[in-house]
């Protein structure tokens, strides 16, 4: 690789594109522990891993089909050498649909899989809004049973608890697209030409937590003017339709049975709505049978995000606790994952119905929440660095390499110092690497009477010695343990004893 400077002798300014982040070893190690815990739990439920590529044909991503001469700007896209549009994946669900359709005959049905990976959004970045982030999905394809939806809710709840989110600090909230369709029919918005108003109503309901019933009422009617004076045009519904929508938003209670009664009243005149209530009733029973209470999984009509995409039950994992924000005010994490039934996605590739349901975790947001609650999975000091074998005599490099190899063959993480510095600088390097101990051998150790030796330096105890806070007897004992010689033949055993001392 060339190390020549640019032709104009100007250095390139190191800078990170907006909406992207670098991550260091501590965050990476903590994230790996979190992902391992999720994998372990998903595997316990019988899901198996699968991986799809970062790049897909754009037409496989559905809503980002090429428009005139290029795809929707929401994805990062480029043309292949055959002029076909390719895009970085926007989520993990569309690639799964393509994979299942392509391998349909070979896969067991239902097909249960999980996937974890980076996804990309070509959108304006902002606080907590990145152009590249990680998702962790689990999906069941090929089952129309609401038992598959109930299992997703239970698995989401159990996963959160295994990650360190205590019961009472989260809720998996469940709704149903069919119930909302029934509400829209009851409000006179069921016709195809009412699609725009339905979307406005959905957006209004989604703001219930922030604006309250009066704010939603305004958005369902003529519109709402906020504190800054900006006006948001409303759905223009009449009072009867507004009353129906608000009755739906108020149907949720602290018990699933009461919520089901309320929802059944709201959609009494809609067959599709009644079908949705029946599915929710079955999910509630299955969740109880799986050992989850209403403090874990709760029916909640306020879950409306993505309902234009989903075809049946929808769910959202919501964190209910608050933390102190940068401005000192309480901040709620809210949703860290969600999903639902999407029976139409695989059918795009096969022209036949293929039922499917899934749940997606926002890894970065969940990781931040786990740090906030002090989950031991992500909170902790840095992992111990490798044992460093110092190089004091350049002509002995092969011999030092042999010492490193012996340690590695015994399963000890070790490295040979490859810089050009002297002994003190090498020991400082080992400190920066968070090494527990270093191996030192100069000519005196190699030529020791009775056979070649090495000096083992316990860097952790050495740091304690430097504080000088021990009495004389403790100090002498500590100094003896902090650095001591052993025969080369005993190198591995001595190093393992030091590592075990600080494990």
Image (cartoon, rainbow, N blue to C red):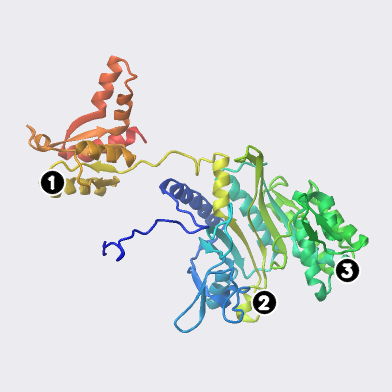
Q: Find residue 273 and report its image quarter.
A: bottom right
- The circle on residue 181 is none
Q: Find residue 136 and report its image quarter.
A: bottom right
Which residue is found at the position 83% from the left and 51% from the top? 213
Q: Residue furthest bottom?
A: 82
- Secondary structure under tag 3 reads loop
The image shows residue 470 at horizontal and vertical percentages of 33, 18
| Mark 1 vs mark 2: in front | 1
Mark-to-mark CA distance, 2 and 3: 29 Å
Mark 1 or mark 2: name the one nearer the start of the chain: 2
Task: Please state, as top left, top right, bottom left or bottom right, where the N terminus lies in the image.
Answer: bottom left
**Residue at the disc numbered 2:** 353
Question: 383 or 452, which lies in front?
Answer: 383
Check if mark 3's residue and mark 1's residue have beta carbons within 8 Å: no
Mark-to-mark CA distance, 3 and 1: 85 Å
Question: How would you rate the neighbour count of disc 2 (Cα within 10 Å): few for under 14, some for 14-19, many for 20 or more?
Answer: some
Mark-to-mark CA distance, 1 and 2: 70 Å
Q: Is residue 233 above or below residue 376?
A: below
Residue 281 visible from this viewpoint: no
Question: How would you rate the neighbour count of disc 1 (Cα within 10 Å): few for under 14, some for 14-19, many for 20 or more?
Answer: few
The image shows residue 369 at horizontal and vertical percentages of 58, 45
**Residue at the disc numbered 3:** 188
Mark 2 or mark 3: name the one nearer the start of the chain: 3
**Residue at the disc numbered 1:** 394
- Secondary structure under tag 2 reads loop
| Mark 2 vs mark 3: in front | 3
The image shows residue 277 at horizontal and vertical percentages of 80, 61
Which residue is found at the position 49% from the left and 71% from the top? 55
Mark 3 or mark 1: name the one nearer the start of the chain: 3
Q: Is residue 461 above or below residue 125?
A: above
């Amino acid at each position: 690789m060339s190390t020549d400077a640019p032709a104009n002798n100007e250095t390139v300014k190191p800078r990170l594109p907006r909406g992207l982040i670098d991550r260091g070893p501590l965050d990476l190690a903590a994230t790996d522990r979190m992902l391992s815990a999720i994998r372990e739990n998903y595997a316990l439920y019988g899901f198996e891993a699968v991986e799809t590529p970062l790049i897909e044909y754009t037409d496989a991503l559905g809503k980002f089909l090429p428009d005139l001469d290029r795809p929707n700007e929401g994805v990062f896209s480029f043309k292949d050498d055959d002029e076909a549009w390719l895009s970085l994946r926007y989520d993990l669900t569309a690639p799964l649909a393509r994979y299942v359709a392509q391998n349909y005959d070979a896969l067991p049905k239902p097909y249960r899989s999980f996937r974890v990976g980076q996804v990309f959004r070509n959108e304006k970045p902002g606080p907590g809004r990145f152009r590249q982030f990680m998702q962790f999905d689990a999906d069941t394809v090929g089952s129309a049973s609401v038992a598959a939806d109930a299992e997703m809710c239970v698995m989401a709840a159990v996963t959160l608890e295994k990650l360190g989110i205590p019961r009472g600090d989260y809720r998996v909230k469940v709704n149903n697209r069919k119930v909302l369709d029934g509400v829209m029919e009851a409000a006179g918005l069921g016709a195809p030409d009412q699609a725009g108003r339905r979307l406005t109503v959905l957006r209004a309901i989604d703001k219930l937590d922030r604006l309250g019933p009066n704010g939603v009422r305004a958005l369902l009617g003529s519109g709402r003017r906020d504190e800054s004076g900006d006006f948001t045009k409303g759905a223009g519904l009449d009072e009867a339709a507004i009353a129906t929508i608000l009755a739906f938003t108020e149907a949720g209670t602290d018990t699933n049975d009461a919520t089901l009664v309320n929802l059944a009243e709201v959609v009494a005149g809609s067959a599709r709505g009644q079908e949705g209530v029946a599915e929710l009733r079955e999910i509630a029973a299955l969740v109880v049978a799986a050992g989850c209470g209403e403090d874990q999984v709760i029916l909640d009509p306020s879950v409306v995000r993505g309902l234009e995409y989903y075809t049946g039950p929808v769910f959202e994992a919501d964190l209910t606790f608050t933390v102190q924000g940068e401005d000192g005010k309480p901040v709620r994490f809210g949703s860290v994952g969600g999903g639902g039934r999407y029976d139409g996605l695989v059918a795009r590739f096969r022209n036949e119905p293929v039922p499917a349901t899934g749940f997606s975790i926002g890894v970065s947001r969940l990781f931040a929440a786990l740090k906030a609650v002090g989950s031991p999975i992500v909170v902790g000091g840095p992992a111990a660095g490798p044992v460093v074998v110092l190089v004091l005599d350049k002509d002995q490099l092969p011999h030092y390499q042999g010492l490193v190899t012996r340690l590695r063959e015994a399963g000890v993480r070790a490295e040979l110092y490859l810089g050009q510095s002297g002994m003190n600088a090498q020991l400082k390097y080992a400190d920066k690497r968070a090494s527990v101990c270093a191996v030192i051998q100069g000519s005196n150790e190699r030529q020791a009477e009775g056979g070649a030796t090495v000096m083992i330096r316990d860097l952790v105890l050495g740091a304690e010695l430097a504080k000088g806070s021990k009495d004389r007897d403790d100090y002498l004992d500590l100094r003896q343990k902090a650095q001591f010689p052993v025969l080369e033949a005993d190198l591995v055993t001595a190093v393992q004893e030091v590592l075990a001392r600080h494990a």
